[in-house]
Image (spheres, helix red, strand yellow):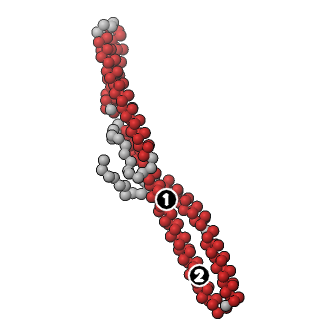
Amino acid sequence: MSQYRRRIYLVNPSFQLKFSFLITVLVIISSLFYPFTIYELIERYVSLVSATNPEKILDVKQYKNALIIALALWQIGFSVLVFIICIIFTHKIAGPIYKLQKYLATIREGVTEGKLFFRKGDYFRDLEDDVNETFETIKENYKRDVVYLSEVNSYLKNLVHVVPEDKKVVLEEINRNLDEIQLRFTKHV
């Protein structure tokens, strides 16, 4: 299989955006402790400088304002980075689920697409193996059932020649239904 890289990172936007937003909010809330602690330290330092060296108070207040702006920008940048990392992380979760949904939809439509493959680096690679093994088992059961139905169908077709005339109609109806079932089975195998 060729290396396939999906360029769309929001394959399940409702899940990915909600998850990323919640994690980012959690990071913002948990990291607010540090700016408040630093702000409190700076305020104490400003008070100390104001009491001991009043001519330096303007320089210290400018430094305080610059530091507050730098911390706010750092917090915003870090939050954006966390949000982007969450989108990339959830892409490795939502991508396989999206691919599985598409795979199952094609099977429901009667199109057998072969095996299910996830991208390298995706999570739930074991799900890929489970789905492929499950459908392989189903196909093998289908094949055995088709063989058995074929035998039953042949037996009933031979039986039509020896049963009374009033029973032939019933046997012919059963044979038609068996032929339809066999056709469905062979179409999906």
* Left or right relative to 158: residue 35: right
Is 55 placed above or below 6 here? below
Q: Which residue is pictured at 69% across the width and 85% down the height?
A: 48
* Left or right relative to 84: residue 179: left
Label 1: state its secondary structure: helix
As drawn, the residue found furthest toward the front would be 52
Q: Earlier in the sequence, mark 2 or mark 1?
A: 2
Instruction: State the image quarter where residue 179 is shown.
Output: top left
* Left or right relative to 44: residue 130: left
Whether residue 95 is visible to the viewer of this picture, yes or no, is no
x and y percentages locating residue 46 in the rendered image: 66, 84
User: 101 or 163, which lies in front?
Assistant: 101
Is 131 placed above or below 57 here? above
What residue is shown with label 2? 65
Q: Which residue is pictured at 37% across the width and 58% down the height?
A: 7
The amino acid sitting under disc 1 is Cys
The amino acid sitting under disc 2 is Asn
Label 2: state its secondary structure: helix
Give the mark count: 2
Q: CA distance from mark 2 to mark 1?
A: 31 Å
- Graded by Cα atoms within 10 Å as few (under 14), some (14 to 19) or many (20 or more), the crowding at tag 2 reads some
User: 176 or 68, which lies in front?
Assistant: 68
x and y percentages locating residue 49 in the rendered image: 67, 87
x and y percentages locating residue 2 in the rendered image: 30, 50
**Where, quadrant-wise, is the C terminus in this rendering?**
top left
- Graded by Cα atoms within 10 Å as few (under 14), some (14 to 19) or many (20 or more), the crowding at tag 1 reads many
Instruction: State the image quarter where residue 45 is shown.
Output: bottom right
What residue is shown with label 1? 86
